[in-house]
Image (cartoon, rainbow, N blue to C red):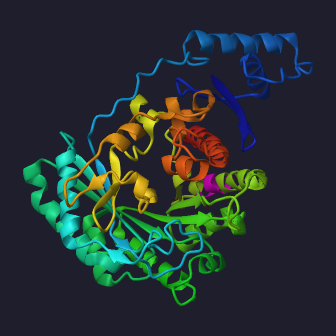
Amino acid sequence: MVHVFKCLGRHFALDVESGSLFEVDELTADLIEKRSPLAKAKGDFSRYSETEIAEAEREIDELVKSGVLFTPAPVHPEPVYKGVVKALCLNIAHGCNLRCRYCFAGDGQYHGSVDFMSPETAIKAIDFLIAKSGTRKRLEVDFFGGEPLLNMKAVRAAIDHARAVEKQAGKEFRFTITTNASLLTDELIEYFNREMYNVVLSIDGRKDVHDYMRPTASGEGSFDKALENSLKLVRARGDKSYYVRGTFTSRNLDFAKDVLALNDYGFGQVSLEPVVLPSDDPLALKEEHIETLKEQYEILAREYISRRASGKEFGFFHFNIDIYNGPCASKRLVGCNAGDEYLAVAPNGNIYPCHRFDGMEDYIIGNVCDGNFDETLPNLFATTNLTKKEGCNDCWAKYYCSGGCAANSIQICGGIKKQYKLGCELMKKRVECALAIGAIESGEQQ
C-alpha cells in the first residue's frame, strides 16, 4: 500500500509497510497513485511528454524492485496476552477545583462523589505494579485526577515507597503528574523538578478560550494563575521533560491560534488535543468541522517550520514523528497498551483498563487492596490490536495510530473493534503534516 498526498504545497509518497517516505514531483505522484489498486482517478498525463513519463516510470520501477515502494504487507502474528504490566495511572483524586466544561470525568469526580486515594492504597498500587511487571526494569506511574495536587499526601507516599524499594526490586520508576497548575507552590515546583520525569500542565491556549472552558468552582477564570505558575515551573525545570496540554472544541475551531499562543507565552513543548464528546454535546467536534480542522493543522505546520527554522523552541506533540527510526513492529500494532501493559487505579483501589474507564462497573479488572485480578478484560484488550479493528488493515495511517484509542471506540462507537471515524480523519491529517515537516526539515539540514 502506498499513500500519495499533498501537504504544505509539496507532493509525497509513503510506502505504508516499509515506512519509506519520498518527496516527489506531481507527475511521479500521479503515476504512483495510478498504480494503486485503490486509485479512483488515473490522472491527466496529457501535459507531460512521453520521455518525462517514461523516465518517471523507470524511477518508480527501481524503487519497487529495491523493496521500498509497494512493499507487500506482512502476515502479523496473532496478538498474545503476556500478563505483564509496565505502567499505572493513579487517579489520585476524584475531585477538582476547576469545572472544565468538557470534562469526561464529571468535574473530576468520575460521576460519583469526591474521593481521595489513601497513602496506603497508593503504596499497594506501587507493590501491585512491581509484582505484575515481570522482568521489566523501567516502570512508569502517572498521577492523575481530578486534580492530583489536592492529594499530595498520597502522591508523596507512592513516590517515597517506590524509591525505597526500587533498587531491591530491580526496578527503575519514572513518574509523571498532570495538573491544572493553579495550586502549584515554590515547594511543589522544587519537588516535581526533582522527582517527576515529566510534568503535564493543563492550559487550553488563549486567555478567553481557557477561561471559558476551565473556570474555577466559583465560576472565575483560571488562566492567569495557571499561566503564572506553569511558567515558573518550566523556567525552573531546565532540560527536564514537560508538556503544556490543552483541548480544543467546536468553540475554538481556529485552534492553531491557541497552539501558537502557548508557544508565544513561553512554552516550548505543546500538545492540543481534539475534544471527544457525544455528538449532541454543543462543544463536540462534528463531521462538518473536519475540513476546517485540517486547514488549521496545515496553518500550524507552516508556522511550526518557520518558528523552528528561526531557532525558537517549539515542539508540538502530534508532529513528533521520526521519519527515519519509527517504533518497532510490535509497538506499531498496539499503541498505548491500555487494558494490558497500562492500567489505571481508582481511589478505592479498583483497577481499570485506563483512566477513561474509571467508575464504569463493567470494566473493573480487580483491586490493588485485596489482590483480586481478573485477566478477562486485559486478555481482550491485549488481543484486540489494530489487525482486529474494523477498517484498520486498509488504512495507510494504521502504523501511526496503532488502531486508535480503545476508550473512544468503546465509549463513543459502542465496541472495542469499532473506529472513531472523526478521530481517524484528524489523525491522518496530523500524520501527513508530521511526515511533511520531517521531510522538509531534514532537507533543510542537509
Image vertical order of residue 76 relative to residue 233, above or below: above
Q: Percent from the top left, x then y, of residue 429?
A: 66, 45
Residue 254 sits in which quadrant? Answer: bottom right
Task: Look at the image and give the residue range highlighted in magenta.
Answer: 302-307
Q: Percent from the top left, x then y, of residue 180?
A: 45, 75
**Left or right placement of residue 33 versus residue 366 in this view:** right
Image vertical order of residue 47 relative to residue 443, above or below: above
Q: Percent from the top left, x then y, of residue 270?
A: 52, 61
**Left or right placement of residue 426 versus residue 375 in this view:** right
Image vertical order of residue 5 relative to residue 42, above or below: below
Q: Is residue 172 visible?
A: no
Q: Percent from the top left, x then y, of residue 405?
A: 51, 47
Residue furthest to the right in view is 46
Q: Residue at x 83, y 10 (%)?
A: 51
Q: Is the magenta region chiefly helix, strand or loop?
A: helix
User: Which quadrant holds the N terminus?
Assistant: top right
User: Which quadrant holds the C terminus?
Assistant: top right
Q: Residue at x 34, y 62 (%)?
A: 240
Residue 109 sits in which quadrant? Answer: bottom left
In depth, the one of 167 and 376 nearer the eye is 376
Q: Residue at x 58, y 9 (%)?
A: 65
Asked if the stretch drawn in magenta spans residue 145, the answer is no
